[in-house]
Image: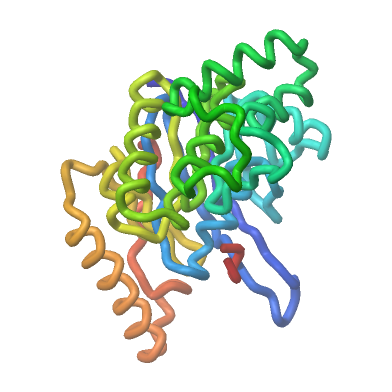
Amino acid sequence: MGELIRIEDMCKIYNPGENEVRALDHISLTIGEKEFVAIIGQSGSGKSTLMNMLGCLDVPTSGTYLLHGQDVAEMLDDELSDIRNREIGFIFQGFNLIASLTAKENVELPLIYRGLPKKQRSELAIEALRKVGLEERMHHKPSEMSGGQQQRVAIARAIAQAPPIILADEPTGNLDSHSSVEIMEILKTLHDEGRTVIVITHDPGIAAKAGRIVHIMDGKIYKDEINEGKSESTIRAEVAEAQEHVTTKVKGGSTNNESGMDLHIKEDSDDGEE
């Protein structure tokens, strides 16, 4: 499995100076091709900022981000836009569908920006909707679909151009439990087909579905582990224990490191205000 993403000593600082906020604090992380990774953290942990960096939606204050060996941190806006269009399929919690367009038209929209001809756009959109089980609903608008169906349209939009990376930000956050299971099964299928899937979540139940779990807190990665069948309750307990550890260290005035925790970061393996 080749290396896809390498982040080295990355920082993202807001309001530099006396009142600065370190949303990301010297993070290093490697993700290989075809991995299924969950990045888990509570509100304010820095996971949304990290997602913005991984998705080339923002650039770090310092550090390196290599994507397929290219230094993304040094790219201009147009170059970042091109990378996003070619390399990454985004799935957001809020669906981000255009209400006046049908499911098929919503899926086609990013393909227009890629300059694909109408016939090819139509074929790709239909195939993507078929993959998520919505071929028969392609002419329905978002208001005529359930939340789970809308999220499946969003997934179809993300995969229509066959990007190698699927980046999902709280993909089940607005869904009921049944729809959540369906969405995670679709993401698992995409991974089985050879995509790299990265899920940003606060939910231990979602993280438990991934093959690797990266825990983030206070802008630092404090645990990075291969998931060998951990249960939702075990992951939930680990998150709670980490939070308690941080709280205790802060109250005790520890100066070992800014998060008061031992960092376990594999070398190979919501901005600070999320």
Q: How is the image coloured?
A: rainbow
Q: Is 100 located above or below residue 132 in the figure?
A: below
| Residue 130, position as x, y percentages in the image | 47, 20
**Which one is nearer the viewer's eye here, 168 or 136?**
136
Q: Is 92 located above or below residue 119 in the figure?
A: below
> Does 28 sit left or right of 75 as displayed?
left
Residue shown at 18% from the left, 49% from the top: 230
Q: How many marks?
A: 0
**Which one is nearer the viewer's eye here, 91 or 204?**
91
Q: Is 246 located above or below residue 6 in the figure?
A: below
Q: Which of the 4 image quarters holds residue 108?
A: top right
Residue shown at 30% from the left, 77% from the top: 245
| Residue 117, position as x, y percentages in the image | 77, 11
Residue shown at 58% from the left, 25% from the top: 68
Can you say which quadrant of the picture contains the C terminus? Answer: bottom right
| Residue 99, position as x, y percentages in the image | 69, 45
**Which one is nearer the viewer's eye here, 130 or 266?**
130
Residue shown at 82% from the left, 39% from the top: 77
Can you say which quadrant of the picture contains the N terminus? Answer: top left
Q: Which of the 4 image quarters holds residue 78?
A: top right
